[in-house]
Image (cartoon, rainbow, N blue to C red):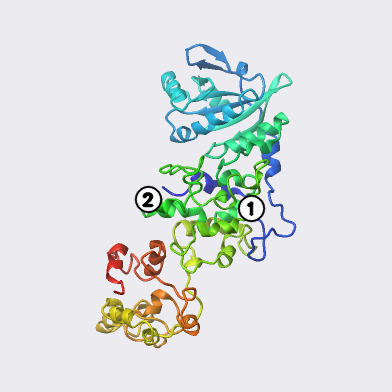
Amino acid sequence: MRPGPLLLLALLVLPLTARADWTTERPAGAVLAEGTSAVLTGPVGLPAPALDMALIRMDGEVVDAVDLVTGPTFLFYYSASCPHCQHVAPEVAALARRLEGQVAFAGVGSGSNSISELREFTEAYGLPFASYKDFMRTFARGNGANSTPQLLLVRPKEGGFETLGEWRPFGGGMSLLAELRAKTLLGVDPWTSFRPGAFHGAQACGACHTTELRSWGLTHHSIAYWTLFERKEAENTECVSCHVTGLGLPNGFVPGDHASPLADVTCEACHGAGGPHVPGAARPAPAIDRCVTCHDAEHSIRFSAQRALPHVNHFRPEALDPSLFAPAREALVDGRAPRPLTAFPEGANLGDAVCAECHKKETKSFQKDAHASAMKTLKARGSQQDVNCVSCHATAKNTPAPTAADYYGGGVGCESCHGPGEQHVAAKGGKENIVGLTDSCPVCVIESICTRCHTPEQDPDWNLEEALKKVGHR
């Protein structure tokens, strides 16, 4: 499983707003929600729906599709065997109930399904509207329905019909967009579609906030759930709560729903369910106040909201050419993107002798570890002057360190794992100027430090869990 294929597609096709620097502020001249008009009024020039065909009702009777559309109507095209259709069916059913009496709904089942399969699908997912079989596949051909699920909003017009909105494919979270469009059409306040406590997901937010969605797609928040899935921790509720949106809240993320639009740390994790759009609700607390609910002392190293904010900015810099978006996204998913919040403090390395002045017990314990004598293995094979080898067997005095002479002798020292000690020594201690890898330190942070050298190419049998048992300073 890779993170959100539909969302990745949406991220790839959205425009990229130019910015000359990193910021969390709206750039001068930028439209904060530039996609709002298209969401409310719908795209221009959609082809009229093809409805001149016969469909089969669940009781076996043949009906004309034109008779199903006597006013504004949503047509839900699906296949009973399609897992994507199964996933969104409850959302479509909920949308139909919310719009009952305002907009009609009809299900059009794929001709590849039997009537009994379509009937079972309708009953299993509680669809509060009738479904019809496209037994000759004329609906699919006439409306370009080459995949499922799809949702079309249509209505009669001057002896024919018109399409007012289409969602192809229809994905999790899109019911909000369909509801906004329908209410605008009906002359109803569309913002009443935002209900207290209802989460919608990043793709729903991004339909209006297009630049913000693309920017979010290059942050580590956008793959937060994938990192758990990759490490086989997606069922660990202790971890999941900070890698998804709304866990434990009504309408929030449901454990095990790996395809949920609320997987990952989405917009609403920071801005609240519905953000500031819920009519009559108090304005959500500033998003920055929510950071520490997950980035606390137990789960984040040296966390500072001010240090973190530039990396969750909502407007990407002008320097990122649009053609580079996909490679940048791929680097993020593949784990090759920089992880600035796990970066070491700035400053020079001072060497183990300086560390030992205060940390005598830890130094004595560390001397028994293989890291402390890592240079011996290089000397045994005559590679002690090869800087490509030395860089992972010793600690640099300063960076850059182009030659073997720029490294402390002995082995992998304290500062290779804990960061430069210059600030720490100058301040005579302190936890904000050094990386402390305690028992409560997130595994992902420790792993990012270790795997700089313990790569699959250099150490194919290396195992983090086993390695950690050997490096405790006890």
Q: Residues within 10 Å of mark 2 (few under 14, many from 20)?
A: few
Count of labels in the image: 2
Q: Nearer the viewer, mark 2 or mark 1?
A: 2
Q: Residues within 10 Å of mark 1 (few under 14, many from 20)?
A: many
Could you say which is closer to the camera, residue 162 or residue 418? 418
* Left or right: where 127 falls relative to 276: left
**Residue 176 image point, x, y percent:** 60, 37
Check disc 2 and report the residue beneath it. 236
**Residue 402 image point, x, y percent:** 44, 83
Could you say which is closer to the camera, residue 467 or residue 360? 360
Q: Amino acid at mark 1?
A: Thr
Q: Determine the residue positioned at 43% across, 42% down.
A: 257
* Left or right: where 29 falls relative to 236: right
The Cα atoms of the two marked residues, 2 and 1, are separated by: 33 Å
Is any part of residue 410 visible from this angle? yes
Could you say which is closer to the camera, residue 288 or residue 342? 288
Q: Amino acid at mark 2?
A: Asn
Q: Determine the residue positioned at 51% across, 40% down.
A: 250
* Left or right: where 468 falls relative to 142: left
Q: Marks 1 and 2: in contact by CB < 8 Å?
A: no
Please tell me whether residue 120 is drawn above or below residue 43 in the rendered image.
above
**Residue 208 image point, x, y percent:** 65, 45
Q: Determine the residue positioned at 49% across, 69% down.
A: 302
**Residue 87 image point, x, y percent:** 46, 35
Check disc 1 and report the residue beneath it. 211
Please tell me whether residue 345 is drawn above or below residue 81 in the rendered image.
below
Which quarter of the figure is the C terminus placed in? bottom left
